[in-house]
Image (spheres, rainbow, N blue to C red):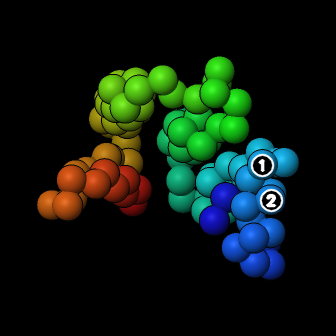
Amino acid sequence: MPFKAESALASLIKRTQERAIPVAELDAQIPGALSGIVSKCIERDLEFRYKSVSDVLKDLRTWEASTRFTSCRLTRRPSSRYNFGCG
């Protein structure tokens, strides 16, 4: 969860008042660039959030291309959801 709270209501309140914890801080296996994409997806300020899904996919594909020679890859699950794997 990007917002640590004692209850669902407290989490919703935090969502309106705080920025989310970067997912790379919650799981060290998540690459920083991918964490930045996630953060931009859940950004509170609309000015800094992705404008469209195609913009998200563009950044995901750019990130994937940059990991071509590493062990981190973006894969597509049968459910049409994306997953990343490192290692």
Q: Picture coordinates of residue 31 (x, y %)?
A: 53, 46
Residue 16 marker:
1
Q: Picture coordinates of residue 51 (x, y %)?
A: 48, 23
The image quadrant of residue 59 is top left
Element on which disc 1 rests:
helix
The image quadrant of residue 64 is top left
Amino acid type shown at disc 1: Thr
Which residue is at a point 78% across and 49% down the rendered structure image? 16
Q: Nearer the viewer, residue 6 or 83?
A: 6
Mark 2 touches mark 1? (CB < 8 Å): yes
Residue 3 marker:
none
Q: Nearer the viewer, residue 86 or 3?
A: 3
Amino acid type shown at disc 2: Ile
Q: Picture coordinates of residue 79 (x, y %)?
A: 20, 61
Which residue is at a point 80% across and 78% down the rendered structure image? 6
Element on which disc 2 rests:
helix
Q: Is 26 situated above or below 76?
A: below
On the rendered structure, is 35 left or right of 72? right
- Quadrant containing the C terminus in the rendered view: bottom left
Q: Is residue 22 visible?
A: yes
Q: Is residue 62 visible?
A: no
- Quadrant containing the N terminus in the rendered view: bottom right
The residue at which mark 2 appears reads as: 13
